[in-house]
Image (cartoon, rainbow, N blue to C red):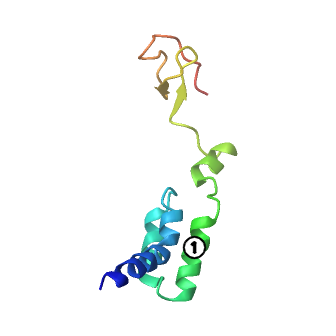
């Protein structure tokens, strides 16, 4: 009976390898779900592995703000670098005057 435990644990570790690799990604839950539900098929397991290994793209908000489609909700204080909400004329932390919003 003891000789079956190590191969079983090794099999589970290999089965969930895509989940372990993609653990720190933004879509780690989706990778886990794909791995859990379709990992028993070779295609599902390979798909989860490829997804876990691919580089994450910039978010849509980053892309839209870089082309000027949306504006940020806050900016950094020029004196203390804390986040100042849009519309505030002064930093709440250090009291420094913030740049004017367009």
Q: Residue furthest left?
A: 1
Furthest-right residue in view? 67
- Whether residue 89 sits left or right of residue 68 in the image: it is left
Above-or-below relation of 100 to 46: above
Q: What residue is at 62 percent from the left and 72 percent from the top? A: 50
Which residue is under mark 1?
Answer: 49
Q: Residue at left 49%, top 62%? A: 27
Q: Camera-side residue: 8 or 32?
A: 8
- State which quadrant residue 71 falls in: top right
Image position of 76 (left or right of 57): left
On-image quarter of the N terminus: bottom left
Residue displayed at 50% across by 36% down:
73
Nearest the viewer among 8 and 29 is 8
Question: In the picture, which quadrant includes the C terminus?
Answer: top right
- Residue 2 vs 74, above or below: the answer is below
Position of residue 71 relative to residue 52, above or below, is above
> Label 1: how many residues lie within 10 Å, few (<14), some (14-19) or many (20+)?
many
User: Is 49 on the left or on the right of 37, as rendered?
Assistant: right
Which residue appears farthest toward the bottom when viewing the image?
Answer: 41
Q: How many discs mark residues in the rendered view?
A: 1
Front in this rendered view, residue 79 or 91: 79
Task: Tell me residue 5's x, y (percent).
Answer: 35, 79
Residue 58 percent coordinates (x, y): 63, 53
Residue at 43% over, 65% down: 29
Q: Secondary structure at mark 1?
A: helix
Q: Position of residue 51 (x, y in %)?
A: 59, 70
Residue 74's spot in the image, x, y percent?
A: 51, 31
Which of the two residues, 32 or 91, is positioned nearer the viewer here?
Answer: 32
């Amino acid at each position: 009976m003891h000789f079956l435990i190590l191969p079983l644990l090794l099999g589970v570790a290999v089965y969930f390898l895509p989940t372990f690799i993609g653990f720190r990604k933004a879509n780690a839950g989706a990778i886990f779900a794909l791995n859990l539900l379709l990992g028993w098929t070779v295609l599902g397991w390979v798909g989860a592995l490829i997804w876990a290994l691919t580089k994450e793209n910039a978010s849509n908000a980053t892309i839209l703000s870089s082309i000027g489609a949306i504006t940020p909700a806050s900016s950094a204080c020029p004196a203390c670098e804390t986040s100042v909400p849009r519309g505030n004329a002064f930093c709440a932390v250090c009291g420094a005057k913030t740049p004017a919003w367009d």
